[in-house]
Image (cartoon, rainbow, N blue to C red):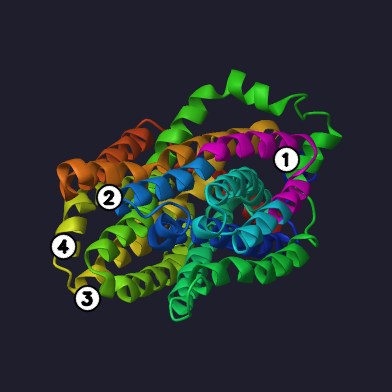
Amino acid sequence: MSTSTVVGRRSVLGTKDRVKTAVAAAVGTSVENYDFIAYGTASALYFGAVFFPENDRFVGTLLSFATLAVGFVMRPLGGAIGGYFADKLGRKPVLVAAMVVMGAATFLIGVLPTYEQAGVLAPILLVAIRMIQGLAFGAEWGGAITMAYEHAPWHRRGMFAAIPQSGNPLGIALASGVFAWSATLDGDWQWRTPFLLSAVLVIVALIVRSRLSESPEFKEAQASGKTEKNPLLATLRDDWRSILRVIALRVVESFAYYSTATYLLNYITERNPDLRPVALGAITAASILAIAVTFLAGALTDRIGRRPIYITGCTAAILFAFPMYLLTNTAHPALIVTVFIIGIGLIHASLTGTQGALLTEQFRTATRTSGASLGYQVAAAIGGFAPLLAAALVGTFGWPGAALLYLGAAVIGLVGILATKETWGRDERGRVLALVAEERRP
């Protein structure tokens, strides 16, 4: 049997645009994450006092994290809408549209009036814009990952799908770095500047993404009439088990990040305001490390499979739950840096690096973006409540409450990966490598 008979119009070596597509997806993902994470950072550091009455600082913090969670609640709807159109019309249009909406919403946050200036109208506008942010962010992820995955060489899909995932920590690093710098500014410019600067990043990402070619797998499915009339309903009907698995796999990663970078940042600065620059710098350093770890984790899955890396990441999160707070409570700068390096730079990055291929491979081409996006964003909506839940638990039980929350999410992730079949086992690797060798043969 010839290679052309097996793969149809597509080459097992991927398309000529495979690197450009993966990098463009990563650029856009980094900007989307910058925008979304900027809000989380501002919620932890500023919004409790800026947009809510200062009668009770604890209540202000809870309300600030509640508005953070609103964006996450909207993400499943964004994922459903974005996934539907990506599977129906193509991946590229969704990526461009999501970028425009996200960029506009983030810029508007930078020009909002404060509670002191506009009263209750200020938090209302903040929540409305946060909802729009959530829709746009929910629509973006699935298209970016499937584009990179479907352009990639078959035997390197873990690595190529990890490239846009590496955009996550890059955006986090940019946001954290800008907030660390803007903390030296005066007054409201401390929190407004990072949102206003996002306009520059959005313009660059739009230029890059507008030059992408459409996914070859989508074009083939469209040409052969194999797209679904309603991909969202089809995936809910046929792939609901896979959606549940994706939710379980994603919950641990979402909680691992937001419990650390958002809640732990607030926990540290509320108790030791002088440590704010240390914590922000640590998040930036950990995020820079995570760029490399995310990519390496994805590449490693192409060699040993997806499950071993994910099992290791979940196990590490379980073991780290209580030491994370024990180290933080020392208030020693070096130990605080270590906590963020482990939590974000190693544990979280190993999970995100594996997710690109692992979650995508739970679904067929016709419903791939819908299924992966919906499961991913439902879990993100749950994870978005991590800071709020952690703050409430600490208020009641002290720091062990937050540690138990982190531990519980890690256990859910471990159960999820143990219940998920390997999508890139030895047999699959052997068959694809044989096809690669045949196609490379003169």
Q: Dot 3 corresponds to which residue? A: 334
Task: Give the residue type that dot 4 points to.
Answer: Asn
- Is tag 4's residue or tag 3's residue first in the polypeptide sequence? 4
| 392 with respect to 71 (left or right) | left
Is residue 206 toward the left or the right of residue 261 in the image?
A: right
Q: Position of residue 41 (x, y in %)?
A: 44, 61
Tell me the number on the disc at residue 329. 4
Of tags 4 and 2, which is closer to the observer?
4
- Establish if 236 lies above or below 303: above
**Considering only vertical position in the picture, is 370 above or below 190?**
above
What number is the disc on residue 317? Answer: 2
The Cα–Cα distance between marks 1 and 2, rounded to whole angstroms, is 33 Å
| Mark earlier in primary sequence (3, 1) | 1
Residue under circle 1?
86
- Between 346 and 280, the one lying in front of the other is 280
Q: Nearer the viewer, residue 328 or 407?
A: 328
- Quadrant of the image for the N terminus? top right
Does residue 326 appear anywhere in the picture?
yes
- Residue furthest to the bottom in view is 184
For label 4, the crowd category at 10 Å Cα-Cα, with few meaning under 14, some 14 to 19 and many 20 or more, is some
